[in-house]
Amino acid sequence: MRQVIKNRKSRETDISVNLNIDGEGKSKINSGIGFLDHMLELFAFWGHFDLEVTTKEADFKVDIHHANEDLGIVLGQAFKEALGDKVGINRNGFAAVPMEEVTASVTLDISGRASLKMDLLGKAAAYPLAQGEEKYKMEYAEHFFDAFAKQLGMNLNIKIENPSNDLHTSLEPVFKALGKALAEAVGIDPRRKGIPSTKGVID
């Protein structure tokens, strides 16, 4: 079982993640950010990951920035640790998910070379638009994905075609597609006997 408990405590947050990559899509998430909780529930469900998140402390009196970004950091670290030496994994994955007029496409590669490219195609959805009590913004999602990708060592490309002025409609298919694409990437190919790199190592 590729399972890990990861904790990160700083002056700004105290976050714990319990991850089972080979799970059933069960989740119990309390990040302190209701909108992000819902998005991560979708991510876990469509990725078949068992995921528990607990935020014990966060500086919400200032804003949600640190809790949002730090959760991306811890989640990325948890996936990287649970994958270990990455022997036998597919390594890359792709998924596209629609929601109403929006289509989100996620392409990723667990290459050890971290990067994020996030494009909003078609009509522009203004970044200042916010969702939920915590006023979650598109820029917060970008910060979360960037932290996640960097800590996991993942090349992550996200495209949102015809983004909606409703942030929920734009981001829900992204988190679903991310779960599906990552599930493909971390899946084991029985034909692959070693690390999926011609170099023989993924840092």
Image (cartoon, rainbow, N blue to C red):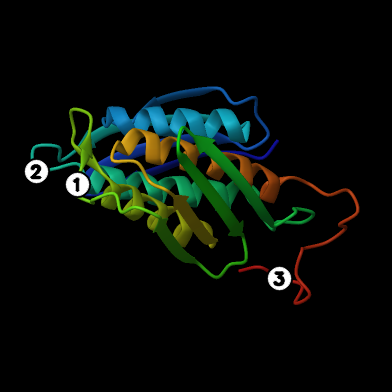
Camera-side residue of 153 and 181: 181
At label 1, counting other C-alpha atoms closer than 10 Å, the crowd grade (few under 14, some 14-19, many 20 or more) is few
Element type where label 2 sits in the image: loop
The spot of residue 112 in percent (x, y) is: 58, 67
> Which residue appears at 42% of the width and 57% of the height?
121
For marks 2 and 3, give the CA distance. 42 Å
113 up-or-down from 42: above or below: below
> Which residue appears at 54% of the width and 32% of the height?
44
182 up-or-down from 50: above or below: below
> Which residue appears at 28% of the width and 40% of the height?
165
Disc on res. 64: none
Direction bottom: furthest residue: 199
The spot of residue 7 in percent (x, y) is: 40, 42
Where is mark 3, residue-wise?
Answer: 201
At label 3, counting other C-alpha atoms closer than 10 Å, the crowd grade (few under 14, some 14-19, many 20 or more) is some
Disc on res. 62: 2
Q: Give the side of residue 54 with respect to residue 135, left or right.
A: right
> Which residue appears at 59% of the width and 56% of the height?
107
Labels 2 and 3: the sequence-earlier one: 2
Q: How many numbered marks are there? A: 3
Labels 3 and 1: the sequence-earlier one: 1
User: Mark 3 belongs to which amino acid?
Assistant: Val
The spot of residue 196 in percent (x, y) is: 77, 63
The spot of residue 191 in percent (x, y) is: 91, 53
Question: Which is closer to the viewer, label 1 or label 2?
Answer: 2
Where is mark 1, residue-wise?
Answer: 12
User: Mark 2 belongs to which amino acid?
Assistant: Val
Q: Quadrant of residue 28?
A: top left
For marks 1 and 2, give the CA distance. 10 Å
